[in-house]
Image (tube, rainbow, N blue to C red):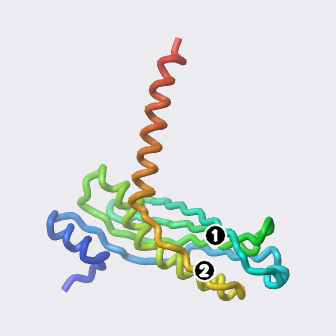
């Protein structure tokens, strides 16, 4: 029996369909976390009608030929009116073994499959720290990383086309 961790039936099916391709989660870890409640006790004396703002970012670093560190950063700011009730930021890290993938497929895996695995851990860490801060539980909704990646690719393509169209006009 193999010691490798796979990420569900889809990964196992893909691996069986394409021999030589491997995708395995090696480790999940909390890289950084911060929690601030700048309103202090004043936040508990107001009616709880929060305005929640969520920011999301992913970053991938190549560790060696087959290992990649992916960091998912989630920042949640909750305001009551104009004042910030609390701000929490989590950097959830993961070490992934990836080999045998075509070079053009790697960015999508690093920006969709890896963050999809890390997101529940980051969401739980945020929920736990918010509750420990004596605020109501904050369960963030799921994120469609495939749609976010497709949107980012479209934006980058449009930006390249716009720059390409502008370049001939600026040359003299």
Quick check: 5 above or below 68? below
For the N terminus, the image quarter is bottom left
Q: Nearer the viewer, residue 170 or 84?
A: 84
Q: Nearer the viewer, mark 2 or mark 1?
A: 2
Q: Residue at x 19, y 71 (%)?
A: 13
Q: Residue at x 36, y 56 (%)?
A: 108
Provide residue 109's location: percent of width, then percent of height: 35, 61
In the visual, does 15 lie left or right of 152? left
**Residue that protrudes farthest toward the top in the picture:** 172
Provide residue 45's location: percent of width, then percent of height: 83, 84
Provide residue 145's location: percent of width, then percent of height: 42, 62
In the visual, does 10 lie left or right of 139? left
Quick check: 148 above or below 19? above
Q: Residue at x 47, y 44 (%)?
A: 155
Quick check: 127 above or below 71? below
Which quadrant of the structure image shows residue 17? bottom left
Circle 2: element type: loop
Distance between the alpha carbons at the discs numbered 2 and 1: 10 Å
Q: Residue at label 1?
A: 76
Which quadrant of the structure image shows residue 25? bottom left
Q: Residue at label 2?
A: 138
In the visual, does 29 lie left or right of 112? right
Quick check: 160 above or below 167? below
Marked residue nearer the N-terminal end (2 or 1): 1
Q: Nearer the viewer, residue 61 or 40?
A: 40
Circle 1: element type: strand
Give the numbered dot on residue 3.
Answer: none
Are the residues at dot 2 and dot 1 in contact (C-beta closer than 8 Å)? yes
In the visual, does 109 lie left or right of 94? left
Provide residue 127's location: percent of width, then percent of height: 59, 82
């Amino acid at each position: 029996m193999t010691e490798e961790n796979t990420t569900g039936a889809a990964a196992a099916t893909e691996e069986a369909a394409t021999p030589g391709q491997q995708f395995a989660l090696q480790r999940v870890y909390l890289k950084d976390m911060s929690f601030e409640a700048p309103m202090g006790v004043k936040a508990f004396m107001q009616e709880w009608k929060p305005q929640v703002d969520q920011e999301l970012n992913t970053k991938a670093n190549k560790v060696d030929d087959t290992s990649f560190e992916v960091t998912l950063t989630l920042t949640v700011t909750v305001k009551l009116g104009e004042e910030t009730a609390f701000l929490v930021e989590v950097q959830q890290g993961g070490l992934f073994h990836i080999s045998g993938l075509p070079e053009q497929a790697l960015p999508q895996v690093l920006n969709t499959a890896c963050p999809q695995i890390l997101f529940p851990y980051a969401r739980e860490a945020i929920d736990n720290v918010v509750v420990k801060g004596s605020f109501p539980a904050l369960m963030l909704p799921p994120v469609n990383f495939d749609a976010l990646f497709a949107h980012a690719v479209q934006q980058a393509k449009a930006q390249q086309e716009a720059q390409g169209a502008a370049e001939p006009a600026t040359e003299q």
